[in-house]
Image (cartoon, rainbow, N blue to C red):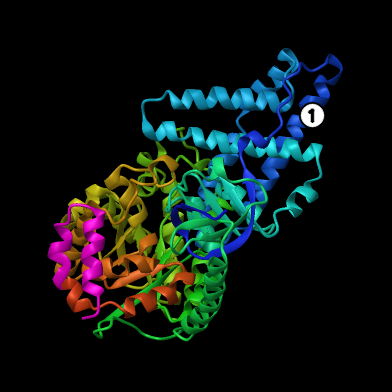
Amino acid sequence: MRRVFPGYAAAPGMALGRVRLEQPARFSIDNTPLPDSEVENEVARLERAFAVAREDMAELRRKLHGALAREVGEFIDAHAQLLDDPDLIEGLRAMIRKGHYRAAAALKAQRDRLVAVFDNMDDPYLRSRGEDVDHVIARVQSALARQASSEEKKLATRVGEILVTESVAPGELAHMASHGILAVVAGSGSQYSHSAILARSLHLPMLVNTDGVLEDLRDGDLVLVDAVRGEVIVHPAAQDLAQYRNWQREALREGQRLAQLAGAETRTRDGRKLRLFANAERPEDIERARNLGVAGIGLYRTEFLFLAHDGLPTEDEQFHAYRDAVLSAGGLPVTIRTLDLGADKADAAGLVMTAEPNPALGVRGVRLSLRQPDVLLPQLRAILRASCYGPLRILVPMVTEASELAQVRRLLHECARDLRTSGHEIPDQFELGAMVEVPAAALNVRALLEVSDFLAIGSNDLTQYVLAADRNNDQLGKLYQPAHPAVLRTLAHVIGRARMARKPVCLCGEIAGDPAFACALIALGLEDFSMLPDRILAQRDALSRCDRKALRALAPRLLRARDRSEVAALLDSAQTPT
């Protein structure tokens, strides 16, 4: 019998396949006491499972590249640190040796205990971290289960299936996608989570917050996932299948049409020229972006150099990487962002950091760089040396007040002077900009503009800080909404002040490449966008449909909107042909 379950489209597309139901209960837990003779063998099984889980995550980390490596890599690094927690592993060994638990039962007991601890925390952010424990222990449970059954047989069943689950960690999603799943339907989750970002990058249709699917669907059910309209159809009718085939044909034509936009100028319907930049991390990202006709690299992330390195990268190693990025750009400007690490992943880079209760609000970005000149100065010197090879700008993350940027500028001048003294040819002028990603920087942007040559808005962090909603917290998916009027007013304030000061401002968060936000950003006055290379063509197309004059006239009403639905209605009215 045909049934329809509504959900939120987190990654667009459609897919037809059989249901693969994934729930924690799928792990078989044997609670019978372990005989003395099997204790050490069971400890060895547990340790092998941890080793396999670590290797799975390391392998996934190696496979990630481009901007995705940072977005998903942060999450994977945090999970990898949990796998190395000596207290967790030693506690499990003790449960097996002294309590005669079987490995799977010990894992479940530890999982239940730790999640209960997180659930009882008052701080919502810390409470949400219980989900990380859940994902990590589920990964070890999975590795244990693979020791008892044929992994190849288990993976083979994923080809052509639709994953239906309560939630899915980014690493798990990437692993299953590589084995042929067609789409994901999650009972919870956010459109802006790391898993959703990964699904979009993999072109894997994904629905989140799809109520009732775990209770009502069964393994093997035939389902049609429609992540365009936001619904999953169980036992689709002939008309649904016809609609799916039409979508497939249309998607093929659309891909061919968008391909023709490569290299074209980006203009609104009424002729206003816009600039599309690319977010990049490696020379291959830059080359791909150039082929699509970008105006430059709006955000070149440098974290990968530190995260992929055993210890801190040297000044020369960094110089070679930045020089190659500039050369790859072929004369287009490259905006290099200084290190944006914090306590949640600094250990992976060999930086000595004290564990912080809330890393998102802790020592990260420029706060970390200014505390550790042995890290910042070699990076600034390397960037300055690379600036001889082409146009280059320097962007500083997590700025809260103008004095932080002023300190960086002073250090830059000192580095330039020392380099010139030692014979390096350093340009006389270099542009220094600030990322606006915390409310303090946005509200006090006039002071920031006095010491900045340009601004870049990091809308991902800015949104979560304005709304006090972690975008990776599945329970807050309905709260993390960049179209919230408060976020739009904050963006409008920053863009407006930068325009008044006649200084460039670019937006480089997720919404910059989301066609659904094209009209809103044009209405706010944005003219520079930076996004993943694979978003360039679709966003260029969406922007070309915007009537800038009409949208700008709408801005005052848009900024008085009371909620997201009013924002959406106003934007729809402005784009409706008359």
Say which element carries label 1.
helix
**Picture quarter containing residue 9?**
bottom left
Residue 423 at least partly seen: no
Residue at 35% across, 61% down: 395
Picture coordinates of residue 97 (x, y %)? 75, 16
Picture coordinates of residue 397 (x, y %)? 35, 54
User: Front-most of 394 and 106?
Assistant: 106
Residue 281, compared with residue 388, is above or below; it is above
**Picture quarter containing residue 569?**
bottom left
| Quadrant where the image shows the C terminus | bottom left
Residue range highlighted in magenta: 553-578
Q: Is residue 79 left or right of residue 441?
A: right
Residue 1, compared with residue 550, is above or below; it is above
Picture coordinates of residue 429 (x, y %)? 30, 71
**Magenta span contains residue 555:** yes
Picture coordinates of residue 6 (x, y %)? 44, 53
Residue at 45% across, 26% down: 119
**Picture quarter containing residue 50?**
top right
User: Front-most of 440 and 171?
Assistant: 171
Which residue, given by chain and number where applicable, does mark 1 sit on? Answer: 44
| Image mark count | 1
Q: Is residue 99 left or right of residue 403?
A: right
User: Front-most of 69 and 453?
Assistant: 69
User: Front-most of 439 and 554?
Assistant: 554
Residue 144, compared with residue 438, is above or below; it is above
